[in-house]
Image: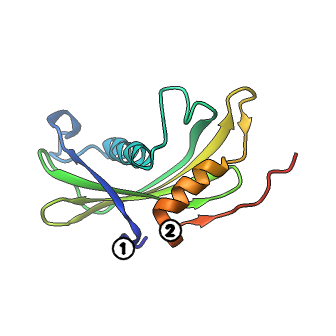
Amino acid sequence: MNPEQFKFKTQVRVRNHEVDWQGIVHNAVYLLYFEIGRAEYLKNLGVKIDINSIQHDYKVVLVRNEINYISPARFDELLDVHSRIARIGNTSFTFEGYIEEATTKRFVSENNAVHVWIDPRTNESAKVSDNFRKLVQKFEGNNVAIEWQLFST
């Protein structure tokens, strides 16, 4: 993961209920922080997302979520959540993300999350739309690997 490739970030502040008995952010909460980063990234691109769908045409489901914990975040720290789409395949796309403490830039955590594009009528995987590919490519430029292959019917 190359931090220089990340063009988008959002911030979250660690709240008291996110800290465990050890005084650090509970491990499961980092997944929520990365989810916030992914949603804000998509909104920044102009992708309309709601509770049921993305762009009202397709659902997106998370199928893999990897996380590495580097250093603990603590109560009231302001965190920068960096997000980007690194790859778009035929029916899936991969987000990368990392979190750093906003003031010191201390590296906190990193994440890879694979999502699959789903046709809501059939609940089967579907080709990632060309419009989505174009939006991501416009924002990411050469920092994203995009497969433009045709979906076989």
Measuring from the top left, give residue 64's x and y in whole percent: 55, 49
State the colouring used for the structure image: rainbow
Residue 19 position (above or below residue 83): above
Q: How many marks?
A: 2
The quadrant of the image that shows the C terminus is top right
Answer yes or no: is residue 73 visible: no
Quarter of the picture holding the N terminus: bottom left
Q: Nearer the viewer, residue 29 or 83?
A: 83
Secondary element under disc 2, as helix, strand or loop, is helix
Q: Which secondary structure lies at badge 1?
A: helix
Residue 138 visible somewhere in the drawing? yes
Looking at the image, tell me whether mark 2 or mark 1 is earlier in sequence order. Answer: 1
Q: Residues within 10 Å of mark 2 (few under 14, many from 20)?
A: few
Measuring from the top left, give residue 109's x and y in whole percent: 32, 59
User: Which residue: 67% across, 37% down?
Assistant: 118
Judged left or right of residue 40, residue 11 is left
10 Å crowding of disc 1: few (<14), some (14-19), many (20+): few
Residue 96 coordinates in the image, percent (x, y):
45, 59
Q: Nearer the viewer, residue 15 or 103?
A: 103
Query: Which residue was labeled with disc 2?
Result: 141
Quarter residue 57 falls in: top right
Q: Please give the label number shown on residue 4.
A: 1
- 57, 117: nearer the viewer: 57
Which percent across, then down, holds residue 99? Answer: 30, 58
